[in-house]
Amino acid sequence: MKSTLIAVLLAAGFAGATHAAAPAPADLDLSITYYSRVLTPEGVTRESRYEETMLRRPGHVWVERVLAPAAHAHEGHNKKVALKVAQHEHKHFNPVVIPRHVMLEKNTVRVEYIDAHDKVVVSIPKSEYDNVNFDGSWENSFYLLDPKLVAAMPLSKQVSKVAGARWREAEKNGVFQRVLWDEQKQIPLIIESGDRANTFYRRVDVKQQAGLSRAQPWTNVQNYAQREYSDYLD
């Protein structure tokens, strides 16, 4: 869920008042559920749902798709098949099932995918960001939504049941976006968007894990092979 809709709504005249500086962002281990529903012109309703885990540390964001056992088995089958293909053929690169590591170094964003099974690090150049569904924004990676855009959204009349979190809401031409924003942890707890005609609806639920993991999976790659995204192109 990107902040594109928020930016459009704010540009239409929903900017709020200037807010005080936010607290330093907290280290977080998160579980994130994504849900979407779309009504097609043919009258077909399509729904999708998936989950990810996320580690947020200073300068680092680690995102990993939660795969069901059946999905793991399917991926394992694909790996076995790949071993049988001719050496000159390219192995398929699937950025959905490989953990994504986003870094901020000297105000420069970098993204790579780390495959612990095959011990490979795949670097993604900026020119290929669209091909791995990465918008290049550190704010959208680290906070899930740009805090400046969230702070500019008008406060909602909806009452928050979470201490330290407030609802913000914007709507334009029947398209709405609502965000339950945790002011202290600097992270959305719920993101909702859709239209009043009920042709689409999207929701993101963010839950903090009980404790912080000591593992930093991006640090154990000294012996991994280094690859470029172009290595997987035909």
Image: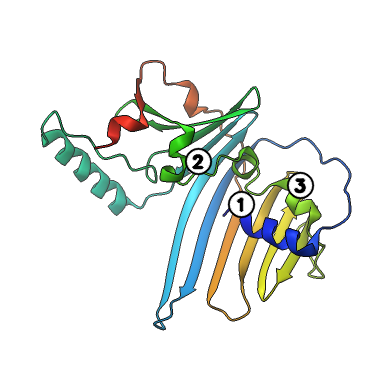
Amino acid, disc 1: Lys
Report the Cα–Cα distance between label 2 and label 1: 14 Å
Residue denoted by label 1: 207
Residue 205 occupies which quadrant of the picture?
A: bottom right
Which of the image's four quarters has the C terminus?
Answer: top left
Residue 226 vertical position relative to residue 196 in the rendered view, above or below: above
Name the spot of residue 1 as percent of width and height, x first: 57, 55
Residue 194 vertical position relative to residue 108 in the rendered view, above or below: below
Name the spot of residue 52 as percent of width and height, x first: 49, 49
Residue denoted by label 3: 148
Report the Cα–Cα distance between label 2 and label 3: 23 Å
Q: Is residue 102 left or right of residue 122?
A: right
Amino acid, disc 2: Val
Please name the residue shown 37% across and 44% down the image: 97
Name the spot of residue 162 as percent of width and height, x first: 75, 58
Residue 94 occupies which quadrant of the picture?
A: top left
Please name the residue shown 46% across and 45% down the image: 130
Q: Is residue 29 visible?
A: yes
Q: Is residue 47 left or right of residue 72?
A: right
Mark 2: few/some/many CA within 10 Å (<14, 14-19, 20+) = many
The secondary element bearing badge 2 is classed as strand
Name the spot of residue 58 as percent of width and height, x first: 65, 29
Residue denoted by label 2: 63
